[in-house]
Amino acid sequence: MSGVEAAVSGGFDVVVLDLGLPDLDGAEALRMIRAVADVPVVVATARDDETEIVRLLDAGADDYVVKPYSAEHLEARLRAVLRRSGSDPEQRTMAVGEIAVDLEGQQVTFRGQPLELTAREFELLAYLVERPGRMVSKRQLLAEVWHQPYGGADKTVDVHLSWLRKKLGETAAEPRYIHTRRGVGVRLIDPDS
């Protein structure tokens, strides 16, 4: 019970709630937290049943992760929840080369000029900007940007990358910022570094 009391105390930016609590049902703990606090809650569960996930989201969870998950996956989910809640303590504007992404304002500038992006293009670019130089698999992008944890069509990622490249004035044949490696993934780099 002390964990629930701590969660509603106002001292946390986000709560990760494991449904496998020893003394209390995790879904009941979620209801107790929601009854008195609006702190963002990310549910960690081994239950991957869609009905159960929908029930938890409807009960007040802000997001969920299915076990097993990596620390990087959980951190990305936490950052996303904090961005949406407006309480992200981390830096709100990030840049790679001449690309600047204002996470809070949901705006991108390229070479000092506003860059018009769709919501999905913004999410994709923001995800890559948060991981400069790091190779990210298409499977990760589908899980984190499209929220399809069980995979999906790689072509979806390819199409959005193509649109982003066009808006950045580059092509897959002559990349500057967005570099892909067949069968491995994609990474965003500063071409001048």
Image (spheres, rainbow, N blue to C red):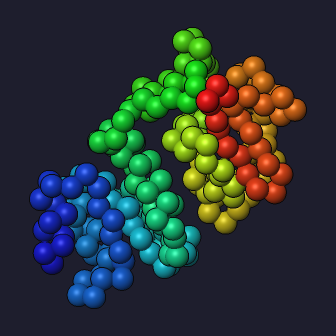
Q: Residue at x 83, y 51 (%)?
A: 182
Left or right of 181? Residue 115 is left
Give x and y (percent) for residue 143.
61, 57
How far across and down, in percent of the image, does residue 10 sit? 14, 54
Q: Residue furthest top?
A: 113
**Quadrant of residue 103 within the rendered picture:** top left
Q: Is residue 89 toward the left or the right of residue 165 in the image? A: left
Whether residue 70 sits left or right of residue 143 in the image: it is: left
Answer whether residue 107 is visible to the viewer in this image.
Answer: yes
Q: Nearer the viewer, residue 124 or 111?
A: 111
Mark yes or no: residue 119 visible: no
* Relative horizontal placement of residue 60, taking residue 168 as reference (left or right): left
The x, y position of residue 75, in whole percent, is 43, 57
Of residues 116 and 128, which is closer to you in this image? 128
Q: Which residue is pictured at 13% across the width and 68% down the height?
A: 5
Q: What is the quadrant of residue 89 in the picture?
A: top left
* Total marks placed: 0
In the image, residue 149 sits, relative to residue 155, either above or below, namely below
Location of residue 28 with respect to 166 vertically, above or below: below
Q: State which quarter of the image contains the N terminus.
A: bottom left
Residue at point 38% right, 33% down? 92
The picture places residue 165, in percent across and down from the top left corner, at 74, 28
Q: Quadrant of the C terminus?
A: top right
Question: As drawn, which residue projects farthest toward the front?
Answer: 193
Q: Nearer the viewer, residue 99 or 7?
A: 99
8 lies above or below 106: below
- Looking at the image, which residue sits at the far bottom? 22
